[in-house]
Each structure stands twice: as structure tokens, then as C-alpha cells.
Amino acid sequence: MRPASPRDERSAFTMIRPLRIYHRRIFTMLGLLLPIGFGLGIAARKPVPIAANLSAALNPAARPYVASDWEQADIFTNAPVYVHTLRQTVRGHRAIAISAEPGFVKPDLLAYWASAKPGMADKLPTNAILLGAFNAPELLLPDEATKTDGAIVLYSLADGEIVAASRHVRFDDSKK
């Protein structure tokens, strides 16, 4: 290998110099146009839609519940979970409110109603009906919950497993 001569270095520099000028111009233009384009994009956004009136099904204030006298602290045998029943004042629909001790923390906990008591497997029963998130203020019960015995199943979506299943229960006025 022969050492590079000063003439070779000069020719390499003259070949790179136009590319450096081109790149400097491109990045200067990008430095000016990107913030302008970003600002125009923010200004051209559509506003977030706001509903003036919610339907009664979505508005919790329009469907007030009164506490029923049915309250169970021992419905879940292996978890510190408490269940209170609620009754809608207008239509008489039943709902439950679930609460737990502060130490009972599970990720993405969902409540299901299953007409048959599930085994403590990782899979939900095929007949399970989603009631809602565990921390919801009230969970509307399906009609099957007042007609047949079943269980409340707490399922961790993040862990993909059943956390707890209640004993058989029927949310009926005749059985308290």
C-alpha cells in the first residue's frame, strides 16, 4: 500500500465538499420546515367532540341505584372481596358493587357472571358474561343472575388467569 499523497487528499476533499453543502442546505430547510409543519398540523386538528347530553344508559346520574339489604363479606372464600347489591329505582334492574381490602391489588381485574361455578383453572367458562371492570361503581347484573344460581368470577386480564370465584349465589329478593 502506498501512502496517500497530498494530491489524493485534495481530490477527495473536492469530491465530498458538494455533498456537505447539499446536506447542510437540506438540514437547514428541515430545521425550518418541520416546526412550521408541526404547528400547522396541530392547528388543523379537528376538535375533540363533546356530547351535550348523554343517553340514560351511559349517564350514571340518570340511573340511580339504591342500596339493598343484601351484603356478603364471605361470598369469596379465598379473597377479601365484599359484594353489595343495588337496585335501580326506576326500572328495578339489579346491580352489584364490589369492594376489596386495600391489600387486594390485581392488574386489569374484570368481573364476570358464570351460571356454573368454574373450576380454578386459568380459563373462563364459555358461558361467562362480562359485568365490567372490578373498580366500577356498579356492575349491572344480567337477568340470569336473578333467575339461576351462578358465580362471580374475577379474572386478571394482565395475568390471564382467574383470581377468585365466588360460591354459588342468586341475586334474588326471595333468597337473601
Image (spheres, rainbow, N blue to C red):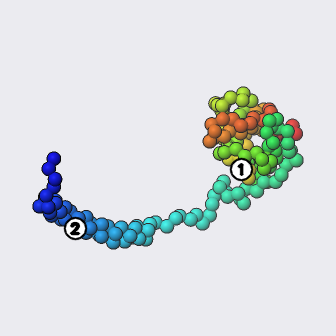
Quadrant hosting residue 14: bottom left
Q: Which residue is mark 1?
A: 135
Residue 59's x, y, as percent?
67, 58
Q: Nearer the viewer, residue 8 or 129?
A: 8
Instruction: Say what amino acid the circle numbered 2 marks.
Output: Ile
Q: Is residue 168 above or below residue 100?
A: above
Residue 49's x, y, as percent?
53, 64
Residue 127's x, y, as percent?
66, 32
Secondary structure beneath disc 1? Answer: loop
Q: Is residue 85 visible?
A: no
Residue at (70% x, 42% y) in the render:
111
Instruction: Say what amino acid the circle numbered 1 marks.
Output: Asn
Secondary structure beneath disc 2? Answer: helix
* Quadrant of the drawing holding the C terminus: top right
Residue at (13% x, 58% y) in the render:
5
Quadrant hosting residue 42: bottom left
Mark 1 surroundings: few (<14), some (14-19) or many (≥20) residues within 10 A:
some
Residue at (65% x, 55% y) in the render:
58
Instruction: State which tag comes first along the sequence, 2 or 1.
Output: 2
Mark 2 surroundings: few (<14), some (14-19) or many (≥20) residues within 10 A:
few
Q: Nearer the viewer, residue 69 or 106?
A: 106
Q: Is residue 74 above or below residue 36?
A: above
Query: Which of the two discs, 2 and 1, sits closer to the camera?
Result: 2
What numbered label is drawn on residue 44? none
Q: Which residue is mark 2?
A: 21
Residue 33's x, y, as percent?
33, 70
Task: Residue at the far left: name it.
Answer: 7
